[in-house]
Amino acid sequence: MIKPDLIVVWPIAYDYPIFRELIADNRNLFGKVIISFAHNCVERDYRQFLKNTHTDFTFVESMADKHWYDDAISIALDEVKSKWVMFMEQDFVCDRKFLVELLKKASDYHFVSLREDQRFHFGCFVAKMKYIKATHRYFGHIPDAHLDCFGLFVAELILMSMGKYAALGELKLEGYKHLSGLTHNYTLMSDGEPAVGGAEALASLKEYNERCIHAKVLQNTQWIELLKKFNSTL
């Protein structure tokens, strides 16, 4: 079983307690946990709270504006020590069994990824560092080429892999769910706007928030009150 360094891009205005709980409970499965802070338009800042709470994590910070996602990933990769890297997003919900099975099976491939429609997604993505280093290490979008964030990066990995890559669905893994649009909805609700999505997506958002409220990690009281406020609108 591989033991990757974990990279998470973290908007400074939000907390994700059940994600923190997942990582803390399964800390032995990862080498370094690298949190790359990114700025956003909401005037809140949980950086110091997170640094004080998770002293075994490594924190880096992107100061970029236009190409913030590319910068946040790049500076995090500079901290990697493992031969493997795992990227996760806070809206990817899973359990320990899923993580263990994923890290066992990933060793047979150049990369393994969440795939939605035809798009490989950094919600959950595991790759060998030596192949990451062989790419241009550009993780932003390229509108003129119709490439979304990390589109060029994934295309380069596919070309190098000679077919040795897999989507999570192909590995027959269970025990995971991707709540697409979580942070976008937090931004909308922070601005007093309603969350977007169908009935099932909004119900999942409300359930996620409830689980965050009751997560067994050190909590930020301001954030918990905000989650309760958000859920009152759902």
Image: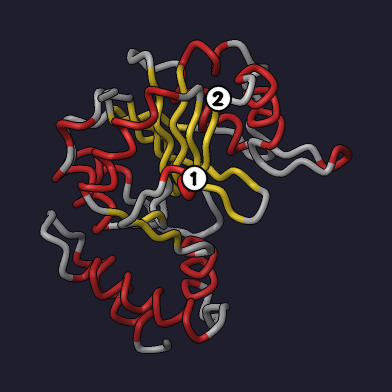
Q: Which mark is residue 170?
A: 1
Position of 67 relative to 47 (above/below): above
Mark 2 residue element: loop
Residue 139 on image: x %, y %: 63, 32
Q: CA distance from mark 2 to mark 1?
A: 12 Å
The quadrant in which residue 92 appears is bottom left
| Residue appearing at x 24%, y 23% in the figure | 31
Asked if residue 166 shows in the view, the reply is: yes
Q: Residues within 10 Å of mark 2 (few under 14, many from 20)?
A: some
Q: Residues within 10 Å of mark 1 (few under 14, many from 20)?
A: few
Left or right of 73, for residue 158:
right
Q: Position of residue 22 (x, y in %)?
A: 22, 49
The answer to whether residue 155 is above or below residue 176 is above
How far from the left and from the top, in percent, is residue 222? Answer: 25, 67
Q: Position of residue 60 (x, y in %)?
A: 39, 28
Give the quarter of the figure containing the C terminus: bottom left
Residue matched to label 2: 164
Figure check: 172 above or below 198: above
In-front residue for pair 144/47: 144
Please tell me in which quadrant of the rendered image residue 197 appears. Answer: bottom right
Of 60 and 70, which appears nearest the observer?
70
- Applied colour scheme: secondary structure
**Residue 217: mark:** none
Q: Secondary structure at mark 1?
A: helix
Question: Type of residue at label 2?
Answer: Lys
